[in-house]
Image (cartoon, grey):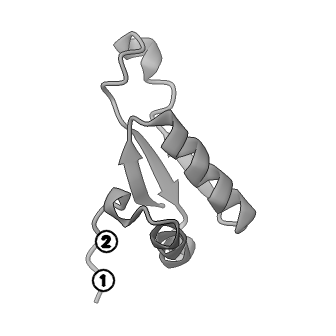
């Protein structure tokens, strides 16, 4: 899996999960339960991870939604 977005914004996470689900793109929100350790201060960002074979489509959906600035840099690809 590859990191698509890293954020503390629960609204953004919910929105991105919605558009990914609608497109049938498998994803996982990592670090979602870290609030237990940090005391709900939202200091540890959540990461949206996407299967490597669907990352380009997921990135396109985020760009199309006008949220390109939220994307993590692409991993090195030849």
Question: Mark 2: which secondary structure?
Answer: loop
Point out the frontmost of discs 2 and 1.
2
Residue 10 in the image: above or below residue 76: above
Residue ID at (39%, 35%): 8
- How far across and how far down the image is residue 74, in percent? 31, 71
Residue ID at (49%, 54%): 49
> Which quadrant holds residue 63?
bottom left
Residue 22 in the image: above or below residue 7: below
Residue 42 in the image: above or below residue 71: above
- How far across and how far down the image is residue 28, in percent? 57, 49
In the image, taking residue 10 as reference, residue 41 lies left or right, namely left
- How far across and how far down the image is residue 72, in percent? 32, 60
- Circle number at residue 74: 2
Number of callouts in the render? 2
CB of mark 2 within 8 Å of CB of mark 1?
A: yes
Question: Mark 1: which secondary structure?
Answer: loop
Q: Which residue is mark 1?
A: 77
- How far across and how far down the image is residue 1, in percent? 48, 61
Question: Quarter holding the C terminus?
Answer: bottom left
Residue at the extreme bottom of the image, as rendered: 78
Residue ID at (48%, 50%): 48
Mark 1 crowdedness (10 Å alpha carbons): few <14, some 14-19, many ≥20: few
In the image, taking residue 43 as reference, residue 12 lies left or right, namely right
Residue ID at (35%, 15%): 38
> Which quadrant holds residue 44?
top left
């Amino acid at each position: 899996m590859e990191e698509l977005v890293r954020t503390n914004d629960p609204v953004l996470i919910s929105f991105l999960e919605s558009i990914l689900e609608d497109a049938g793109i498998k994803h996982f929100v990592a670090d979602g339960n870290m609030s237990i350790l940090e005391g709900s201060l939202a200091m540890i960002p959540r990461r949206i991870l996407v299967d490597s074979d669907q990352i380009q489509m997921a990135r396109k959906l985020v760009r199309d939604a006008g949220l390109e600035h939220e994307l993590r840099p692409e991993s090195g690809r030849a």
